[in-house]
Image: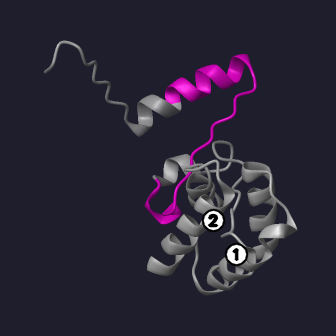
Amino acid sequence: MDEDRLVVQINVPKSLCCCQKVMYQAICFFYCPTNHKDKVDSALLRPGRMNMHIHLSFLKAKAFRILASNYLDIEEHHRPLFEQIEKLLEKIEVTPAVVAEHLLRSEDPDVALGALIKFLQRN
């Protein structure tokens, strides 16, 4: 083992024990994203352990416009690019996080939107 790295192995029983101790002292929130809920240990999914399951949908046109506005500070003057991206979003499934990652790659809206179009066309 490399001396500069500390490897910690945590299994489900250890993590549940730790969580129960913490939960007795204070309210605790855990964010556990997964694309494969069926592969999560059933001990974690029992009532009292995971009390809320939130399904996050794929990106649609309206949400894309909000993302573009927030990340690139742009509005309707990029309408042709928006329309092209919206048509691509109807055909493929992509998460808001993936699109946001592509929007952050350039501060120039034309460059960022052009790169996003290329990415969406490849997928």
Quadrant of the image occupied by residue 78: bottom right
| 103 within the magenta span | no
Residue lying at the far top of the rendered structure? 3
Quadrant of the image occupied by residue 11: top left
Q: Is residue 57 above or below residue 103?
A: below
Query: Does the image show residue 123?
Result: no
* Residue 60: image tag: none
Q: Earlier in the sequence, mark 2 or mark 1?
A: 1
The residues colored magenta run 17-40
Q: Residue 57 or 88: which is nearer the viewer? A: 88
What amino acid type is highlighted by mark number 2?
Leu
Q: Residue at x 71, y 57 (%)?
A: 54
Q: Is residue 41 above or below residue 113?
A: above
Q: Residues within 10 Å of mark 1 (few under 14, many from 20)?
A: some
Residue corresponding to mark 1: 81
- How far across and how far down the image is residue 44, in percent? 54, 47
Would you say 2 lies left or right of 16 here? left
Residue corresponding to mark 2: 113
Q: Quadrant of the N terminus?
A: top left
| 35 within the magenta span | yes
Q: Residue at x 58, y 76 (%)?
A: 93
The reply to whether dot 2 and dot 1 touch (C-beta < 8 Å) is yes
Q: Secondary structure at mark 2?
A: helix
Q: Residue 36 or 74: which is nearer the viewer? A: 74
